[in-house]
Amino acid sequence: MPLDKLQQPQFQEIMQDHIFNTIEFLFDSNQEFGVACEIEYVEFDPILPDYIQKTLPVVTLFMLANYSFESASLDEDYLRFEAGFGNENFGSFVQIPLLSIKQIYVGEYPILINITSPQEEKEEEVVDSMSALLNNPENAKLLKKKR
């Protein structure tokens, strides 16, 4: 089965539940851990300065230890925590969609691997201008009168 077939909503839901349950277990066990995630989906508040943002790889590993672990929270969709970045320890709240988490580590051991990604929001269908005009009955009448 090709991996793209596993991007179906049903499998994504299974993976999201698995990621949630794994992180919840680690929190309940008071176990520090790391998450490797797709950085394009991660939000920072405040936004990281460009010189720091540019240094983050496409898949970035965040270690939830000490204050980052203590500040962490979890809900059905996101893992959130506070972390410091760069030499000056620039503080930012990090929000990671669960499905953007590719791996979870305890020590050097990967304990979870996720091959799915967050669902892309579907763009609204673009309707051509003639169809849009004809959808309005008044416009359709005007066009028929001109013929």
Image (cartoon, grey):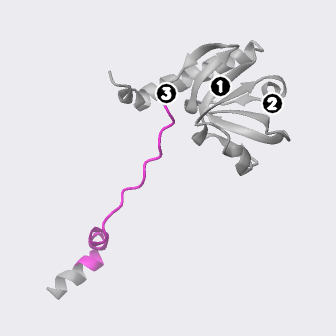
Q: Determine whether 36 is above or below 32 in the image.
A: below
Q: Secondary structure at mark 1?
A: strand
Q: Determine whether 147 is above or below 51 in the image.
A: below
> Residue 117: x, y in percent?
50, 33
Label 3, residues with CA under 10 Å away: few <14, some 14-19, many ≥20: some
Residue picked out by circle 1: 35
Rendering quarter of residue 111: top right
Please tell me which residue lies in front, 107 or 144: 107
C-alpha gap between disc 3 and disc 2: 26 Å
Residue appearing at x 48%, y 38% in the figure = 119
Compare marks 3 and 2 and give the one earlier in the sequence.
3
| 130 falls in the magenta region | yes
C-alpha gap between disc 1 and disc 2: 15 Å
Label 1, residues with CA under 10 Å away: few <14, some 14-19, many ≥20: many
> Residue 56: x, y in percent?
66, 38
Q: Residue 71 bears which disc, if any?
A: 2
Residue appearing at x 56%, y 33% in the figure = 100
Residue picked out by circle 3: 13
For the residues carrying marks 1 and 2, which lies nearer the camera in this image?
Answer: 1
- Quadrant into which the N terminus falls: top left
Q: Specify the segment rendered in magenta.
A: 117-140
| Kind of residue sitting beneath label 3 | Glu
Compare marks 1 and 3 and give the one earlier in the sequence.
3
